[in-house]
Amino acid sequence: MITSLTRSIRSLGFALAFVLSAGFSQAASATILRVLVKEDPGAKNMPVAVTQTAVLQTDGQSAARLDPGRWYILPVNRVNRIQPSNNGLIQIGNQLYPGEMEVRPWRGKAIAVNVLPLEEYLRSVVPSEMPASWHLDALMAQAVAARSYAINTQRQRKWGSAPYDLVSDTRDQVYSGFFKFDPLTSATKPLIHTRSDQAVASTSGYMLRPGFKGYYRARLPVNWVSWGNGYMPVSDGHHLDQEMSQQMAKLGWNWQQILAWWYRDEPIKR
């Protein structure tokens, strides 16, 4: 396992330059999210690793140093907080995550909660929810919808008293971190992309107005209305149709027009 981890870290050399060069400002990343990325019922510990030297705090008091190149087995009868240096990543299972990580107990489960800025979270969500090869305006519309969903879910406390704001699967939005390590090939696959990064950065700060939660689906059951020389789907005012948004973008609609069609209102910059 240590050998595989060492290979994983080495293969990240080219990728980390890509991560650090995305150009996201601190101001744009001001909102902090807590995302549940792993839950293991009945487990008493959780293996973690880091790509850069990190500080481990236990119950907010004692501190220890974590070094790259090895696994650490953290007990989950207490709250462990991992804070990497130099934009290092944290490995949980085969996924590598930016930001900080909290490993702790919660209702009989060992859980890992990724604590990170909103805009970094979106860098993984947008290409997970929509192919990064799609039209840039469709990706930009997706970024605004995903940003709005994340902020509204956090504000409304969907998960009640849980120590996280969102979960990383389709119960909220798919979030897989920045890289995935394949132990069979020792290859590290990027889960972020320059095109979706561009969509997130270009719409930084934009979200839907209050009242629009940012719901979206791959394809909506819709009626059709005559539009120009063809037909357009009728919007319900609450959901974005991803596949149709791609077609709209290819026909020349920009991201603001796409959002205005689906949500019947234009996005605002907060």
Image (cartoon, grey):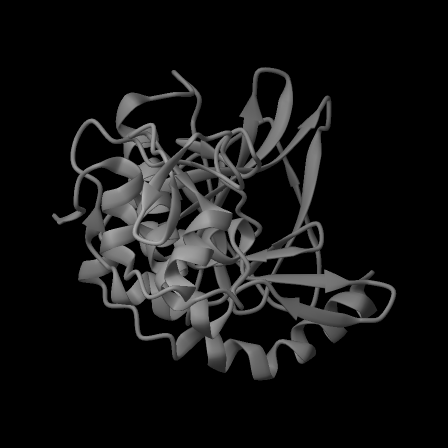
Could you tell me residue 123's position as x and y percent? Answer: 43, 59
**In the image, residue 228 above or below residue 156:** below
Q: Farthest right residue?
A: 184
Quadrant location of residue 178? bottom right
In this view of the protein, which residue sits in the foreground, 78 or 149?
149
In this view of the protein, which residue sits in the foreground, 74 or 27?
27
In this view of the protein, which residue sits in the foreground, 252 or 87?
252
Q: Residue at x 45, y 57 (%)?
A: 247
Quadrant location of residue 204? bottom left
Q: Residue at x 47, y 51 (%)?
A: 125
- Image quadrant in which the N terminus is located: bottom right
**In the image, residue 209 above or below residue 94:** above
In this view of the protein, which residue sits in the foreground, 41 or 146?
146
Q: Is residue 238 left or right of residue 50?
A: left
**Residue 30 visible (yes or no):** yes
Could you tell me residue 266's position as x and y percent? Answer: 17, 45
Q: Residue at x 46, y 39 (%)?
A: 35
**In the image, residue 252 above or below residue 155:** below
